[in-house]
Image (cartoon, helix red, strand yellow):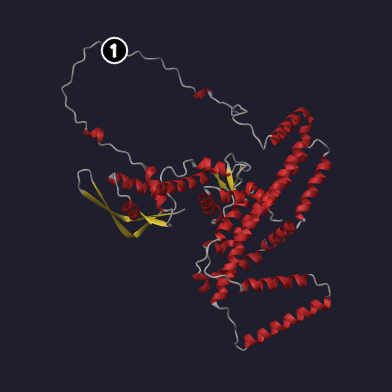
Amino acid sequence: MTLDPSTLATMRRQHPTWRLLLADSAPLIASFLHRVFVVPNVRVMSQAALVEALEDTLFALREQRGDNAYPKGALEYLNDWAANERGWLRKFYPTGSDEAHFDLTPSTEKAIAWLASLAERSFVGTESRLLTLFELLRQMKEGSETDPQARLRELHRRRDDIDAEIARVQQGDVPLMNDTALKERFQQFAALARELLADFREVEHNFRGLDRRVRERIALWDGAKGTLLQDIMGERDLIAESDQGRSFRAFWDFLMSQARQDELTDLLDRVLQLAPVSELQPDARMRRVHYDWLEAGEHAQRTVALLSQQLRRFLDDQAYLENRRIMDILRGIEAGALAVRESPPAGDFMAIADTAAGIELPMERPLHAPASKPAISSVKLEAGEEDLDADALFSQFVVDKAALAQHVRQSLQQRQQVTLGELLDARPLQNGLAELVAYLQLAGEDGASVVDESTEDTVSWQAQDGRWKRARLPRVIFSRT
């Protein structure tokens, strides 16, 4: 691509990556999506879970910057980010689910990766990358050599080098890699591992685009099935035999080998135990990064499977051709939906009646109950003389468990674990023993919370009469799920 001014001006207006970097809320979008999708390698997240995570983030930001910061709701922000004019999230409904799900788009992941690359590095390694370049050139040279004698000479030379190295090791000369070289190579490995996960999302996006084009052609097709199938299968073979398709298939076959998975697991365990690598404090997920590759590749494979399912449904349409009128109506609806996809009508333009059947069993009907007529005596009311104490009515209170749960979630945003004593230091008990019991009930309902019987904490609070009360209990620890 030529980076001339016209091309760059068009990209600035249309490319989702550039639009994200220019957005006023780009810090919120990039940081939130990086924390929720990229860091834990989450490929798909339900709308309810994503809304809850964004609500917590917005609440924390409003506590810092005021209530006017980010005034819209979490769901409204997510729908805005998934709109066609934004393209930062993909909103869809998975098969068999009536709840919307969200996925990160390749353009957004590119923007996040570019922002992450702006951070300063402790040192810039060059040796490992230079050796990688030499190794790539050597592989290309050997892989394209057609002269058998030349390849034999190269293999003999490498064998001689290996024999010489074996002889040196047998004599006690064991060369070791220094700490700087180990750190440099591990940083290069971690960067390539993250780039590979991003590449999987782009491969999945390309396969999804093919599936979308196939659906459009099926919806608008009115000719012979054989012609359409030939065109679709030819386009699928073209993608499968492309450079990207062949590389993905080779990678998948390599990684699906159980021996390769065991080898990767052993190598990662050994490397992460090295002292120079431990000093870098690598991400804990790096130990199972090859399983993240498998999960990301499986999503791409599912997208290819959707294409096959679409073709099978198209072939099964023969059973519906007995009622041509219904098929014509359905195809007309699909064609009309595609025609207004880019500019959908505003407001509610279609109403669908409730499809659920109203079932009322005879035994569920209540029996007839005759209305009873109350007998009202005409007695003159007299003022009572009893003096009752109404203070008991005003001493009632309700413990807000939702506010307590929100306090626990806010405390766990910056920490992995927090004790009940630390929570009460930050926010003392206001309603005494009842509020303490509510905290213990939240800990019992949360599967991630634990109780340390070996350690005892003392909790104190001030009663309404001014006296201080204390309670001793085992240490309760809330953990981030």
Image x and y of residue 439, in percent? 35, 48
Q: In this view, does 397 lie above or below 175?
A: above
Q: Is residue 77 above or below residue 138?
A: above
Query: Residue 169 lies in what quarter of the image?
Result: bottom right
Query: Residue 82 lies in what quarter of the image?
Result: top right
Is 164 on the left-hand or right-hand side of 150?
Answer: left
Mark 1 belongs to which amino acid? Ile
Residue at 30% from the left image edge and 49% from the top image edge: 428
The residue under label 1 is: 376
Is 384 on the left-hand or right-hand side of 247?
Answer: left
Residue at 59% from the left image edge and 54% from the top image edge: 111
Residue at 63% from the left image edge and 64% from the top image edge: 261
Q: In this view, does 296 lie above or below 82?
A: below
Image x and y of residue 358, in percent? 56, 26
Image x and y of residue 118, in percent? 55, 61
Is any atom of residue 366 visible in this view?
yes
